[in-house]
Image (tube, helix red, strand yellow):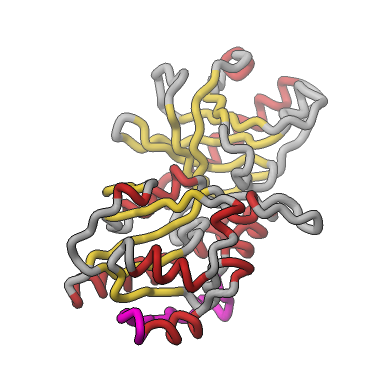
Amino acid sequence: MKVYKNLSEINFDKRTVITVGTFDGVHKGHQIILKRLLEIGKEENLIPIVLTIDPHPQLVLKRADRNPIKLLTTIEERIIIFEKFGIQNLFIIPFTYEFSQTPPEIFIKEYLVEKFFMRKILIGHDHMFGRNREGNKDLLTQLSTSLKFEVEKIDAFIENDTTISSTKIRTALLNKDLDSANKMLGYNYLINGVVDKGEGRGRTLGYPTANIRIENINKQLPGVGVYFVSSEINGKTFYGMANLGTRPTFSNNNRIFLEIYYFDLNMDLYNSNISVSFLNFIRDEKKFPTVGELINQIKSDELYCRGLIKKF
């Protein structure tokens, strides 16, 4: 896949079909758009291009009446997922306040048509863009004749009478409803991070853990608790159990840690980049009166999680 970050890199000698959006989570609704984008490219001999935005507009255009948005996918994670869905050309728009003031007519004409040689645009059911979100399907249709491009709109993706959205997925994750979140995503929620040197406490308990440093502070974390997880390490899938929380048996502060005990893994992961897929919520985090009771609970958790492996 080719990833472009600068307009000077753009040099297409064929007509293109484009979709534009933040695509946070790249959930099932987004996936319908991506699938259709590739179909159009093949059917009409157009180059399919995804234009996404980073950082998220809400992180740039901060509003006092809103809490900072949490991301389902960092830009690095989005790139990986786009590639898995067959996208070959991705342009990342560096989102700034100055860019946000671009009139939608200018964005369509000078960016999409003149720079990207766009001949068709594919948009989601609620897509708006440009200064003050003034751009929409009506404006695209209005300009399509003079600028010689076509517009195709994709309806909202509805499953079980529910319209899938990034907001609903964030809510499900916070509520530890991993089953609903993963169904809406169409894949298992993932967190990427680097394995840090921990305090070694897990090893003394007989359960050595990989301590994951989550580098993007805007990443959406599931609710605090114990989870059944998996990771691809050296081309092999390893299952394990993760504690996402404050380690209340040993600590009184509110800092969140992600610690994973991988089953049957005997290698040093220090400084490795790890992608953790969250498969199942096991239980809430709790403070144990004694270390012995904690170890007994971990043994019980491991037995339960190992029993889940065959389901995945």
Judge left or right: residue 214 versus residue 122: right
Where is 312 relative to 242, above or below?
A: below
**Is residue 77 visible in the rendered structure shown here?**
yes
Residue located at (69% from left, 33% from top): 256
Residue 256 highlighted magenta (yes or no): no
Residue in the image at 54% along x and 68% along y: 103
Q: Percent x, y for residue 259? A: 59, 29
Drawn side of residue 297 relative to residue 115, left or right: right
Answer whether residue 279 is visible to the viewer in this image.
Answer: no
Q: Position of residue 84 (x, y in %)?
A: 32, 53
Q: Which residue: 54% across, 56% down?
A: 99
Residue sitting nearer the eye, 8 or 138: 8
**Residue for point 63% across, 62% down:** 167
Along the viewing direction, whichever of 111 and 300 lies nearer the viewer: 111
Q: Is 161 in the magenta?
A: yes
Residue 302 as seen in the image, left or right of residue 172: left
Q: Position of residue 234 (x, y in %)?
A: 31, 29
Q: Nearer the viewer, residue 23 or 192?
A: 23
Q: Is residue 151 above or below residue 165?
A: below
Number of marks in the image? 0
Residue 47 drawn at (x, y percent): 23, 65
Magenta-colored span: 145-164
Instruction: Note whether 14 is above or below 306 in the view shown.
Output: below
